[in-house]
Amino acid sequence: MVDVNSATPHPARFYSLRFKLIFAFCLIGFALSASLGLSAYKTLESKLFQQLRNNVGNITYMGAALVNKEALSFLLDRQKADMSIEEARAIEDMPQYHLISDQLNYIRNAENELIKYVYLVAPAEKPMMARYVVDADVLNDRDAANITDEDVSHFGTELDMADFPVMRQAFEQGESLVEEEYYYDESFQVNSVSGYAPIMGADGKSVVALLGLDMADSEVQAALSEVLEKSVITALLALIVSLLTAVFMGTVLTRGIVKLDKLVHSFAEKDFAVRSQLRTNDEVGRLGTSFNHMAETIEEYSTRLEALVQAYGRFVPHDLLRLLGKKSILEVNLGDQVEREMTVLFSDIRNFTSISESMSPQDNFNFINDYLKCVGPHIRTHKGIIDKYIGDAVMALFPERVDDALDAALHMLGALDQHNQKALQEGARDIHIGIGVHVGKVMLGTVGESERMDGTVISDTVNLASRLEGMTKKYGCRIIISDVLKSRIAQSEKFEMRLVDKVYVAGKSAPVTLYEVFNGDEESLRRHKAETFGDYNQAVKYYYDQSFLAAEGLFSRIAAAHTDDVPARLFSEKVREILASGVPQDWDGVSRHLSK
């Protein structure tokens, strides 16, 4: 008898179809979860690398603008071949080298944990060669016990650009460039990305130096490692869940992955505030949590970069960008312009030239900066925009009410009086300023050329405001405004004003009536002007009605009552001259040939 069982033996190992299906579903679930996780990981890796490149490009571009051009030019003039270590060290001890070294360290401190190197290089005499100008590490490293001079990128040290093709390309093209891929930094054992931004010469065409910057991918790798770890955990959990119910989890997994895909897409579009709202206790929920951890890390990184942009805003006011309809300095183009009505305020320190002659350059800068620190906040508090500093002069724009400009002017004088009291007590110089204010149409825009632009305001309104400030010296007034501005004041009862003259201003055919605002005068002079206000106005009326005898009597009495009442004294002098020599045939009471 033949044994059937022995004729058709069973396989050594037997697996039921249920187990095979369970294994297949688990394999499919695991494969699907792993492939989606890997895809998301690769997408995030690509986007994070691109974001890192963008950040390197932005920091190098803005950092190049911070480099002091005069100090750089000074150092470039001292580059030469075969420079000895002693010669290099002598230059590195110069203040120009220290200034640029501090600026490079300031750039690095914006991301101190990530930026590994910041340096300036310039073309060398030999092709394909460059020379180090300033390396941010030199001053710290050259005296270290375990570092030799050969290990330090001293001033004038040659660099072979054959190993740095992007650096060479940045020199040749004169534009900011960033490496397309990582390179491994053995010193720090991290991957880094290098960026280069050109610094142009005086002709605006030739590249005199490059700002180089190496930024590590530490935060990117940390975020990706966390995502990878969570993805592995998610894949293992997916295998367990697939074992329980493949169909149900397939539906849930698909719905969750779609949501995560939208989050990744939004994140790729730089919406760093997006967060996963998935709360399911499975791999998709965990993947959402991992995404949130990663997003928080990158958002923190972006916030720090935004702080650097805000620092740049101290050089280009954000309010000025808003007036041009721009959200960022990166959107500003040459020739952008807008026309609108604004109030323009000019202020200037009187006799600054004679004051500055007795001070050192450092004392001059300290003197001006103390003054600007005193008056600048009051311009911003009253909705003003500081358009530019012109030496010791300040030009400010007030886009809303003319009252804002007058309030700012009076608060500037009040703050300056307090500053002067403290300065005199400390034996320092006191400061006296004149302020001119006018209102009208202005053209606000950008001028310059492709490599150097500046925001400016162009119009006759600006010129007249500047001339009004100049007239404060002649008339002994602290604030002079135009008749046009006086007519636009909303709350005229707040301001004490007197007419001081009618003048023909250079470049204008129609006369301008000048008024002084004397709220901010020294108390005894302000009280004198307030008490004689009625007589003064009557005397002015007599003057323009050609009742010179009556005008002379009032003006003389007012001027005699207070020797610092310059407008009354000037009117009195003009009346006496007319009484002595007669009224000119073409007399209209308007002063001519007035210059700033």
Image (cartoon, helix red, strand yellow):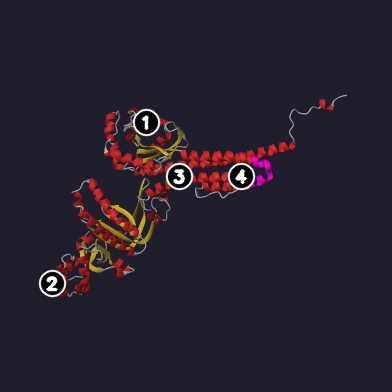
Q: Amino acid at mark 1?
A: Leu
Q: Quadrant of residue 283?
A: top right
Q: Position of residue 385 (x, y in %)?
A: 34, 57
Q: Element type at marker 2?
A: helix
Q: Earlier in the sequence, mark 4 or mark 3?
A: 4
Q: Residue at x 46, y 41 (%)?
A: 52
User: Which sits in the foreground, 62 or 256?
Assistant: 256
Q: Amino acid at mark 4?
A: Asp
Residue 464 visible in the shown view? no
Residue linked to disc 4? 282
Q: Residues within 10 Å of mark 1 (few under 14, many from 20)?
A: some
Residue linked to disc 1? 159
- State yes or no: residue 245 in magenta: yes
Q: Residues within 10 Å of mark 2 (few under 14, many from 20)?
A: few
Q: Earlier in the sequence, mark 3 or mark 1?
A: 1
Q: Element type at marker 3?
A: helix
Q: Earlier in the sequence, mark 3 or mark 2?
A: 3
Q: Is residue 269 shown left or right of residue 485?
A: right
Residue linked to disc 3? 301
Q: In the picture shown, does residue 354 fall above or below 283? A: below
Q: Nearer the viewer, mark 3 or mark 2?
A: 3
Q: Amino acid at mark 2?
A: Leu
Q: Amino acid at mark 3?
A: Tyr
Q: Quadrant of residue 475?
A: bottom left
